[in-house]
Image: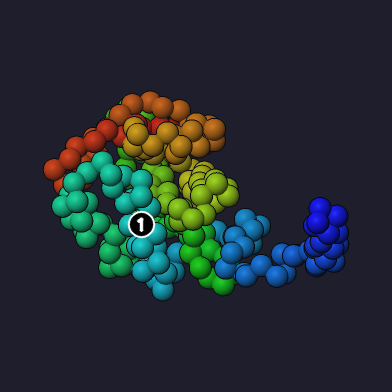
Amino acid sequence: MAAVVVDMMKEDLAALHKLPIPSQALIPRAAMPTPVSEITIGHALPSEAAAIAKIGADTFTATFGFSVSAEDLTQFLANTYLESALLADLDDPTIETWVARDAAGTVFGMVQLVRGLSEPCVPGDALKHAELRRLYVDTAAHGRGIGSKLIAAVEEQARAEGFKQLWLSVWENNPNAERLYLRLGYQKVGAMDFTVGTCVQTDYVLYKNL
């Protein structure tokens, strides 16, 4: 009996070796992430406002939602991440918005450059300050360098316009984002309040010389 079992195992192994090896071509496209090389950064279009608002709301909820009440979160999202609010930003000459999109036009992230705002703790001439705001990347696309590409677009534009310092705020309990900014040359220089409904939280203020 043992010999028969061994012979059957040998036959099974031989059959397995004859099976074709799966290739990426056989993997459904939806299961394969879009390569970063196929992600491009460009100015946001009005037709993308709804997609941008959704990424903003989803990312904010995933990152901060646990730290505030359901009521405060719902009110904040309803007031901040509306398609109409994003369209208003696109019409505002002091705000410039970029998105990361693939060849099919799917939006994976956003970021904004805001002119005319500063914080007292940021060194240098306040007139030469610009803010990097709302860096949001779809949670399913984290870790693929999209955030760095969006930041680079803001820095390039701010530098071209003659700004000398670019500043931003990051939640004190968001170490992953803070590490990204520090790795890209930003320095922690102070703190500021960030209010979500009735909850007042602390954001670190970071800046970078351009």
Q: Secondary structure at mark 1?
A: helix
Residue pictured at 51% horizontal, 49% vertical:
142
Q: Residue furthest front?
A: 1
Residue situated in front as seen by the camera: 93 or 59: 59
Q: Position of residue 84 (x, y in %)?
A: 28, 68
Residue pictured at 33% horizontal, 57% vertical:
57
Quadrant of image for the N terminus: bottom right
Residue pictured at 55% horizontal, 58% vertical:
41
Picture quadrant where residue 93 is located:
bottom left
Q: Residue furthest left?
A: 198
Residue situated in front as seen by the camera: 125 or 182: 182
Where is 150 relative to 27, above or below?
A: above
Kindly identify which residue carries mark 1. 58
Neighbour class for label 1 at 10 Å: few (<14), some, many (≥20)?
some
Q: Position of residue 185 (x, y in %)?
A: 53, 32
Question: Tell me, what colour scheme is on the image?
Answer: rainbow
Q: How many marks?
A: 1
Any part of residue 209 in sight: no
Q: Position of residue 75 (x, y in %)?
A: 18, 55
Q: Is residue 77 left or right of residue 173?
A: left
Amino acid type assigned to the residue bearing label 1 in the image: Asp
Residue pictured at 13% horizontal, 43% vertical:
198
